[in-house]
Amino acid sequence: MTDTLISTEIRGPARINPADRAQLAESPVTMRRVAGLFAGHTLALSGVTAIIVVASVVGLAQPFLLREVIDVALPTGDTTLLVWLVAGMVAVAAVTGVLGVWQTWLATTIGQRVMHTLRVRVFAHLQAQSIAFFKRTRGGEMQSRLLQDVAGLQSVITTTATSIAANLTTAIATAAAMVALNWRLSLLSLAVLPPAIWLTRRVALVRRDLTASRQRALSDLHSQVEEALSINGALLSKTLGNAAAGEEQFATTSAQLIDLEVRSQLAGRWRMATMGIVFAAIPAVLYLVAGFPEVSGGLTIGTLIAFASLQTSIFRPIQGLLNIGAQWVASMALLSRIFGYLDLPVEVREPEHPVRLDPAQVRGEVRFEEVGYRFPDGTVDALSGIDLTILPGESLAVVGETGSGKSTLAALLVRLADPTAGRIAVDGVDLRRIAASDRARIIGMVTQETYLAHASVAENLRQAAPAATDAELWAALEAAQVDHVIAALPEGLDTVVGARGHRFSGGERQRLAIARTLLVNPPILVLDEATSALDTDTERELQAALDHLMAGRTTLTIAHRLSTVRDADQIVVLDAGRIVEHGRHADLLAAGGRYASLHG
């Protein structure tokens, strides 16, 4: 067993975090599910266990060799025996060292592979969740479970699991060796070890609590940095003029760290001092007892030194075993949180047997057949009885007041959610039977909220078409009427757009999104209030790019400003999730109904 493993156990006292206990009470983790994580690693795990046992047993030869050196080889002057004994001591150290390295390599490899598999599973499962999940879940929470919680399992996979076998084997073997050397001194050790263990653990518990407080303060500090120094946080701070308040809050949290760090370091020094006292007291008591013949029973110097070595070494595995409980509960709590995500139902599932559609052959006919939708946590239908047909190359505009269901209708067409009633069909094929990869090339979407990654212009555009050449990128930018903006930049296509695209104006970001969609060249297009956040002049400039994008495509436009939909082939007015009017611009105005009132 390695010293690193032992020392880690001593630093981690066995106080169970109430939050971990509560997590497991709410979402228990079965041992069968834990064992399932290691499927395919049975042979490697058996090898780790075997190495631990062999290393522990081989290591116990050291004190017996030492006893022979002191009691036999040195007093008798037997140099040949001395050479063999010393060579044996070196050999034992070499063998245990090599075994320790081998054990670490095997255990770490298993742990990393298990964590890799788990990390990928969680990532893929989260990607499969509907947009509703991402709306109700904080991004930081997902990142914490995906990265920090999975990484935290390293302790149960490569430390806790191996330390149980290592510490238990070492403790039993050491105790047996102590009894074999001198059973009287073994009884004395049993009386000395419990108070020694209790004392060191009490000091370690204090340090554990201080460390937890320090970690919480550091977490607060990180959150303040992320919120204040992100692009949105900086904009908010400067516009509200609350930079001084943010600085004061940061300074207060930072000051708390001073006290916590000082107290933690002092507790650490107390722990080290306590350990020093214990390690000094144990052999001291042995030497004292050895001075009384009626107790020592003819104890030799070699046996005394060998026994003192064993007694000192047995303290560490016992301490490690006492700490396993808290570490195991903490690890199971992490697994409970991770399994909680893996157990989330997938609301929008990939078809088991998808109907393959060639985007180049898709005509672009879209049908909404008695479509209804109710949010998972809702009691009222967001959409009800939607029955529409958009012919190939035709444009349909959807208007209505806020909350009428316009964006929900658009979300269903790009399958961000599935209808709870009815179906949506493209060229007669139910949308739920089309693979996501095909759907993304058939249906393109431009939304009000344009997302650009913190990467170059070229990298952002190639998210839609990874194999696109620079010439194709420039052609798409020209069609979107934003090529002159990019060409004027010193780095051109290699210009980094900045966090969320803040390097560009709102209209420029929208035109970059249009260029990205043009690279896909989808036969069906969804425009979800793509111009509602822009001023009138910018909207006018952008509309030309949108007209180019819409040419020859089946288009569903969600409109906020009615001036942008007057030329649509069809206009639908939604109210409380239902179609209340349907026709062309002029006809709807003449009817004097809901559309006319919205227009007026």
Image (tube, helix red, strand yellow):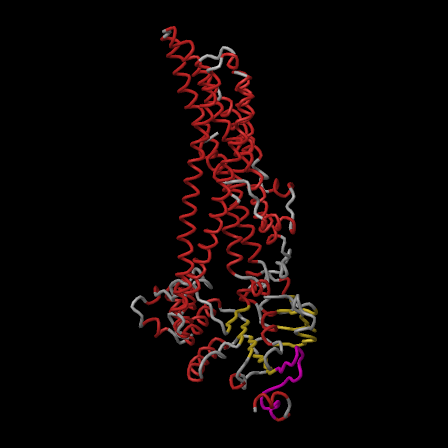
Tell which of 415 and 584 is nearer to you: 415
Residue 313 position (above or below residue 531): above
Q: Measured from the top left, where is residue 315 in percent x and y?
A: 50, 29
Res. 517 in view: yes
Residue 285 position (above or below residue 218): above
Q: Measured from the top left, where is residue 203 in percent x and y?
A: 48, 40
Tell which of 50 and 256 is nearer to you: 256
The residue under the point 54% across, 46% down is 117
Residue 4 position (above or below residue 239): above
Tell which of 47 and 246 is nearer to you: 246
Tell which of 179 and 473 is nearer to you: 179
Magenta stretch: give its range.
Answer: 572-589
Residue 375 placement: quadrant:
bottom right
Residue 207 is inside the magenta segment: no
Q: Measured from the top left, where is residue 303 in percent x and y?
A: 47, 15
Considering every residue shown, the one lying at the far left of the view is 490
Say whether residue 244 is left or right of residue 377.
Answer: left
Say whether residue 335 is left or right of residue 484.
Answer: right
Q: Measured from the top left, where is residue 180 in percent x and y?
A: 54, 16
The residue under the point 51% across, 31% down is 196
Res. 101 in view: no
Residue 573 is inside the magenta segment: yes
The residue under the point 39% across, 53% down is 258
The residue under the point 70% across, 75% down is 385
In the rendered view of the protein, which quadrant contains the C terminus? Answer: bottom right
Count of numbered circles on the image = 0
